Image (cartoon, rainbow, N blue to C red):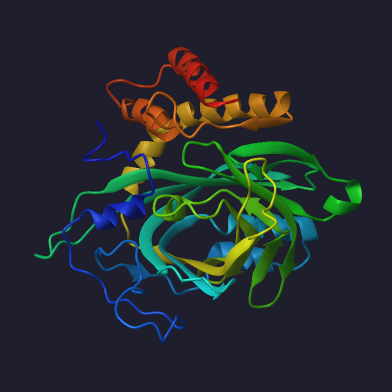
Amino acid sequence: MVGCLLWLTGNATALAEDLASEPIHRQFTFSWPFIEGTSMAPRGGSSKGPEVALDNIAGAAWKRVREKGISPAERDRRAILAMAGGYRTSFEFIETIGFGPDYNPEPPYQSWGTEYVYVITNEPEFISLQHIIVMRFLNAEGVVSNAFVVKHWRQDWQFEDNELHVYVGNNAWERAILSKDEVSGTWSQSVFQTDDSPRYASVGKWEHHADFSSWKSKNTWRPLPRREYSVRDDYHILSGTNRHTITPTGWVHEQDNLKLVLDKKRHTSSEKRYLAREVGLNRYERISEFDFSEGDKYWGLTEPFWTNVKEAWQRIFEEKDQFELKSVYEGRTMIEVLFEYASQITEERPYDPSDGKAFIEKSLVKFIN
């Protein structure tokens, strides 16, 4: 078995609410200053981790992006690859505008993590990055916990991709075909859940400047993330844009979201369409001297299984123009089913592709309409 690992079925940042640890100081730049009391105190992970060493020197990946004499597409590739590595991450979201006289703002969300971004595919026109969370917590006595390891989200990048599976609401995705003109010079970003099911996809162009490189998506529909669906059900879609900005010492993921209401037929409501506007800011600050080895071990053992999961999903994408996912089947989520299987893969009990593929096919079909 790999050390003292914990394979979780949700976002690792939710651990923070369950651990007895010293709360960190909360701060934010803008809020709702005239709301009295503590109702607008940020929610989310309130635990504290051990100190980390920030790597404040422009790394080799950044220098490769800035190299002279390379093609635009190659510069784009290098910007995508620059997102790989080990990071201290912070996740912040706040509703900035409410629509309607009965609007009451929800508390902002703040959390943190440490994670490693692995390059799992690196081809001339396709790159796949897998995020693995590796977190250690500091309790009130100053004792550091063992590592908690969680497979996090995945992002796939494809050059001039004319076929996407986009989210259309009510837990459904459908194939979208783009014209040659629409995708000329663009890269698609397809984002996948922790269980490798689809989340959202869009296209955009990279821009490169002396101090940063940046990619911005088209407007994109996304299902509610865990930080939202676990606490509310008054809207159904995040509709907005994503911007990834590469800096010399890390990268930043910005979101500009509208919270959209749908009816049962996946149509926008004629009476009340948008609830609020939300701003999201996720920082990935490169760190050094942090022990990510437990994440390396986990991924080394389970990557063949997750590769087979991705292959099964690819067959679904090829066969279906539209599909819906069930949130629960017989009281269990897809995340729970797949993560439980992955947790049983150890050095003593290595992955059996034949058994794994059969399990994956049998499991996925239960959740797909």
Residue 34 versus residue 11: which sits nearer the camera?
34
Res. 52 image quadrant:
bottom left
| Residue 334 position within the rendered picture, expressed as x and y whole percent measured from the top left | 45, 31
Q: Is residue 237 above or below residue 42?
A: above
Question: Can you name the residue that lies furthest to the left here?
Answer: 141
Residue 306 versus residue 121: which sits nearer the camera?
306
Residue 44 in view of the camera:
yes
Quadrant of the image for the C terminus?
top right
Quadrant of the image for the N terminus?
top left
In the drawing, does residue 291 fall left or right of residue 56? left
Q: Is residue 89 above or below residue 307?
A: below
Residue name at image x 52 percent, y 23 percent: 364
Residue 189 in view of the camera:
no
Question: Can you name the residue that lies furthest to the bottom here?
Answer: 34
In the drawing, does residue 197 fall left or right of residue 43? right
Q: How many marks?
A: 0
In the drawing, does residue 305 fall left or right of residue 122? left
Q: Is residue 67 above or below residue 313?
A: below
Residue name at image x 24 percent, y 65 percent: 50
Q: Is residue 204 above or below residue 267?
A: below
Res. 89 image quadrant:
bottom left
Residue name at image x 39 percent, y 21 percent: 351
Residue name at image x 31 percent, y 44 percent: 294
| Residue 107 position within the rendered picture, expressed as x and y whole percent measured from the top left | 40, 69
| Residue 243 position within the rendered picture, expressed as x and y whole percent measured from the top left | 63, 64
| Residue 285 position within the rendered picture, expressed as x and y whole percent measured from the top left | 45, 67
